[in-house]
Image (spheres, rainbow, N blue to C red):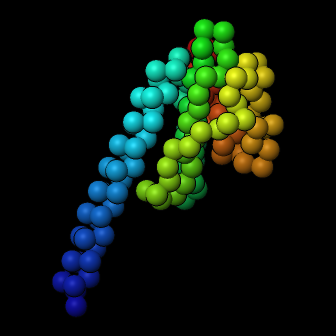
């Protein structure tokens, strides 16, 4: 019985590694495409038992959003998506509490991405 539990745990761990690698590869491909769009700011928030949020924004030379990347989730099945509402907006127009009014984790991640752009 113990060896069966150990076997199941090892198989689950291996599946987690494979799926985690797949998620990282998808994110890296999306991030590489984002980096081609201009200067990029990235912010991340979340914790061990909260959904992790990653927000990345690309800005052109006029400080307008050319592309975005948003990923949120607790599992390896979270995938990167765009934030269409930000497309074309000027950096000064981006207010995390307005863009994500009911999502403090996303607000925090966007705030961090915007701070990177100023630095």
Look at the image and tell me in which quarter the N terminus lies.
bottom left
Q: Position of residue 94 (x, y in %)?
A: 74, 26
> Is 98 on the left-hand or right-hand side of 7?
right
Q: Position of residue 42 (x, y in %)?
A: 54, 29
Q: Quadrant of residue 24?
A: top left
Q: Residue furthest left?
A: 3
Q: Quadrant of residue 27?
A: top left
Compare residues 43 and 84 and report the one nearer the observer.
84
Is residue 73 positioned above or below 6 on the image? Answer: above
Residue drawn at 46 percent across, 21 percent down = 36
Residue drawn at 53 percent across, 17 percent down = 38
| Residue 10 is at least partly visible in this image | yes
> Is 62 on the left-hand or right-hand side of 77?
right
Residue drawn at 39 percent across, 49 percent down = 23
Is residue 18 positioned above or below 9 on the image? Answer: above
Q: How many marks?
A: 0
Compare residues 76 and 109 and report the one nearer the observer.
76
Compare residues 106 and 2 and report the one nearer the observer.
106
Q: Position of residue 58 (x, y in %)?
A: 57, 23
Compare residues 90 and 47 and report the one nearer the observer.
90
Is residue 70 positioned above or below 118 on the image? Answer: below
């Amino acid at each position: 019985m113990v060896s069966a539990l150990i076997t199941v745990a090892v198989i689950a761990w291996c599946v987690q590694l494979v799926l985690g690698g797949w998620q990282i590869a998808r994110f890296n491909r999306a991030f590489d495409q984002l980096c081609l769009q201009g200067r990029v700011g990235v912010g991340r928030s979340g914790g061990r038992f909260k959904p992790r949020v990653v927000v990345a924004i690309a800005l052109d030379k006029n400080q307008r959003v050319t592309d975005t990347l948003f990923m949120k989730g607790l599992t390896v099945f979270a995938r990167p998506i765009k934030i269409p509402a930000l497309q074309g907006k000027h950096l000064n127009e981006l207010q995390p509490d307005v863009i994500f009014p009911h999502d403090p984790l996303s607000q925090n991640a966007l705030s961090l991405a915007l701070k990177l752009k100023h630095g």
